Amino acid sequence: MIPDEQTETANADADAAPQAAPAKPTRRKAAPYTHDQLREVLAVIDAQMHGHLLPNLIHDLKADHRLNIREINGGAHTAATMGGITAVSTAGNYGAIHAWAAAARRRLLEVDAE
């Protein structure tokens, strides 16, 4: 065989072979926060939960605490997920962060009650 024919044959074989679908990356759920981590995040939220500081708060929580905030139901609701807690609000980002903080406080109270 001539080298060009070998290349053409190899290309034809590669084109004919079925391609396996690329593996879909699996999303790991973040481990739930410990009680100390919840208290730390709540302290950050309490210190910066003011209207004019909200963009900075969201940026800090995304960078330091892996906050995932997104619109759901066609933008009718906003969901905030962080440290194994998800909260949903109809009041935008502010409401979602506020609802997340309330859910985190309830989780701490449940543990203290046990």
Image: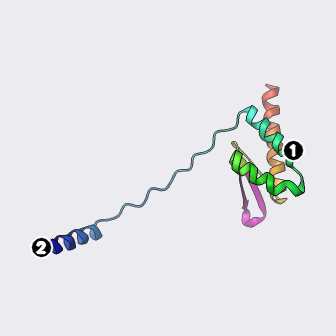
SS under mark 1: helix
Residue that numbered label 2 is attached to: 2
- Residues rendered magenta in the picture: 68-80
Q: Is residue 9 magenta?
A: no
Q: Observer-nearest residue: 1 or 16?
A: 1
Residue that numbered label 1 is attached to: 47
- Amino acid carrying mark 2 in the image: Ile
Residue at the (71%, 33%) spot, across then down: 34
Residue at the (78%, 41%) spot, across then down: 41
Of mark 2 and mark 1, the one earlier in the sequence is 2
Residue at the (70%, 42%) spot, across then down: 83
- Main secondary structure found in the magenta portion: strand
In this picture, is 58 found above or below 18? above
Q: Residue furthest top?
A: 114
In this picture, is 93 found above or below 105? below
Q: Is residue 68 shown left or right of residue 114?
A: left
Please indicate, yes or no, whether residue 89 appears anywhere in the rendered image: no
- Amino acid carrying mark 1 in the image: Ala
Picture coordinates of residue 16, whole percent (x, y): 27, 70
SS under mark 2: loop
